[in-house]
């Protein structure tokens, strides 16, 4: 008896691909279940299958003809030796139309390509491809992510058939990948280590992938993930059949669905697959029968009871008079937004995780930008970030060499040569402050000015044209410092204090 390893439906044609343990992938007509073709895998197990649509090459090259948008279907399978194999669905169906009987094919079709995504060292076991996911929203033409049995996730560009820097934060085999779009735009990856990683791929050759958070709550290895875009909920399934629904914005579980049977040895009744069909509101589960679960009844609490409270000390409280909202931030980076008229929690999200130094990073400062539409936060290890608090997305990551606590952040505008410029100034412990010129189109922003003085703690005050201190020059930065450590208190002009003026518009 043959054992089914993996299965996947074609994206463009009514064909079902099923991988078996006899080193073959059999293709079936999805309407009649008739066997139509067999793919010979050449002594390699087809451990991962996927299919996706890409815009045609004429459209990618910038064709200006006003024709209906055309897509090409691609079928990709990964094997037990660390290779992925790419076939054109149209080429497969063209080959099928020329055959009167069920025929076997391998790598002789047009547009066939292959790539070694997990190179094995000498005397090292071959790395299996456990799961393949295509992300059309990353890069120009999208990228293909391949989860390996060694815990690494390879990232390949199918246009050039090249690899970029892999994601290697998992400690054991990765079993499943899922893209969480809408407001989040993060990739969820999980496997045998029982935790879910939320991260953003960086497709540059030496780029560093950004880990946004980690979801903990399963007591067994995770085997499947499914994202519900309408409800903004991620479902995860572990090997015991337990399903957990996660609120991506707050990184917290909102519901649990128990397995169909409490006996883990009864494999025939245990949930082994989950899926959210496109265009439907239900969660599809598969065991020995198919079952639809309504997503809305999973959380029966009223709106006023769905508050996810802070679990750490609140360090920032801000009122936004433009939108009549109250914003609270705790040490861990959890942001909660409240309606002032009703007292209800309108939105919540987690700030992106930052790199740890000696101690665990904590939020040390927060304020709005000059438009009151962005949240600026500073961390205890020197990171400065700007967020769109209406959807929780990271707008700018301001880079600096400082590893000390952020004491204050200011967003200002000034004019020079009849042009308006925007500048963000952050003050750090140890007499260090940095100036950036961020734009909405640049995620990682390098500084334009870094100044270091042996003053101790700094407090920044901007002296602009609307400042009541008329004696201060316009568009100048006024810096107060003290030789005595502030220790949580702001000392301005105290004994032995010094003051300095800096022209923000110089060298611009």
Image: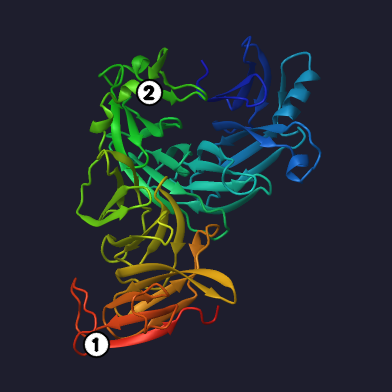
Depth check, front residue: 403 or 238: 403
Q: Quadrant of residue 29?
A: top right
Nearer to us of marks 1 and 2 is: 1
**What percent of the width, then of the height, locates residue 69?**
72, 33
Depth check, front residue: 282 or 40: 282
**Is residue 217 visible in the rendered structure shown here?**
yes
Could you tell me which residue is drawn at 31 percent across and 46 percent down? 337
* Residue carrying label 2: 295
**Is residue 251 visible in the rendered structure shown here?**
no
**What percent of the width, then of the height, locates residue 100?**
78, 13
Q: Left of 72 or right of it: where is 505?
A: left
* Residue carrying label 1: 497
Depth check, front residue: 122 or 86: 86
In the rendered picture of this protein, how many numbered marks are placed on residues?
A: 2
Instruction: Characterize the local packing of mark 2: few (<14), some (14-19) or many (20 or more) Cα atoms within 10 angstroms.
Output: some
Helix, strand or loop for disc 1: loop
Q: Residue furthest bottom?
A: 496
**Which sits earlier in the primary sequence, circle 1 or circle 2?**
2
> Vertical placement of 362 versus 479: above or below?
above
Q: Quadrant location of the C terminus?
A: bottom right
């Amino acid at each position: 008896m043959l054992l089914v390893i993996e299965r996947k439906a074609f994206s463009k044609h009514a064909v079902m691909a099923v991988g078996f343990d006899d080193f073959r992938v059999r293709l079936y007509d999805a309407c009649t279940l008739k066997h139509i073709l067999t793919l010979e895998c050449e002594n390699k197990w087809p451990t991962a299958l996927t299919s996706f649509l890409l815009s045609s090459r004429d459209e990618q090259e910038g064709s200006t003809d006003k024709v209906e948008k055309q897509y090409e279907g691609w079928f990709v399978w990964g094997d037990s030796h660390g290779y992925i194999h790419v076939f054109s669905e149209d080429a497969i169906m063209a080959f099928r139309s020329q055959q009167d009987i069920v025929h076997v094919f391998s790598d002789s079709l047009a547009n066939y390509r292959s790539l070694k995504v997990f190179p094995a060292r000498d005397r090292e076991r071959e790395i299996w491809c456990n799961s393949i996911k295509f992300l059309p929203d990353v890069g120009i033409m999208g990228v293909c992510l391949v989860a390996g049995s060694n815990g690494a996730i390879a990232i390949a560009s199918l246009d050039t058939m090249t690899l970029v820097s892999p994601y290697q934060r998992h400690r054991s085999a990765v079993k499943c990948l899922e893209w969480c779009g809408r407001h989040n735009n993060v990739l969820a990856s999980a496997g045998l280590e029982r935790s879910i990683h939320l991260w953003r791929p960086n497709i540059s050759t030496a780029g560093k992938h950004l880990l946004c958070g980690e979801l903990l709550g399963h007591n067994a290895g995770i085997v499947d993930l499914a994202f519900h875009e309408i409800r903004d909920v991620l479902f995860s399934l572990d090997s015991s059949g337990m399903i957990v629904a996660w609120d991506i914005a707050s990184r917290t579980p909102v519901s649990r669905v128990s397995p169909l049977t409490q006996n883990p040895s009864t494999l025939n009744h245990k949930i082994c697959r989950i899926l959210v069909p496109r265009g439907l509101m239900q969660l599809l589960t598969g065991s020995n029968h198919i079952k639809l679960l309504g997503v809305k009844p999973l959380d029966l609490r009223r709106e006023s009871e769905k508050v996810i409270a802070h679990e750490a000390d609140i360090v920032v409280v801000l009122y936004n008079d433009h939108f009549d909202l109250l914003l609270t931030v705790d040490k861990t980076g959890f942001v909660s937004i409240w309606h002032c008229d009703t007292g209800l929690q309108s939105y919540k999200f987690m700030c992106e995780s930052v790199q740890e130094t000696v101690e665990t990073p904590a939020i040390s400062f927060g304020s709005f930008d000059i438009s009151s539409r962005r949240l600026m936060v500073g961390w205890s290890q020197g990171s400065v970030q700007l967020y769109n608090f209406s959807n929780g997305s990271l707008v700018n990551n301001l880079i600096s060499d400082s590893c000390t606590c952020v004491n204050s952040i200011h967003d200002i505008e000034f004019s020079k040569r009849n042009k308006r410029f925007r500048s963000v100034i952050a003050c750090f412990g140890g007499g260090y402050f940095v100036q950036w010129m961020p734009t909405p189109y640049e995620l990682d922003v390098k500084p334009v000015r870094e100044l270091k003085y042996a003053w101790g703690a700094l407090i920044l005050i901007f002296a602009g044209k609307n400042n009541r201190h008329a004696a201060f020059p316009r568009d100048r930065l006024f810096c107060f410092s003290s030789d005595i450590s502030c220790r949580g208190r702001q000392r301005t002009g105290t004994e032995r204090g010094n003051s300095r003026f800096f022209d923000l518009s110089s060298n611009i």
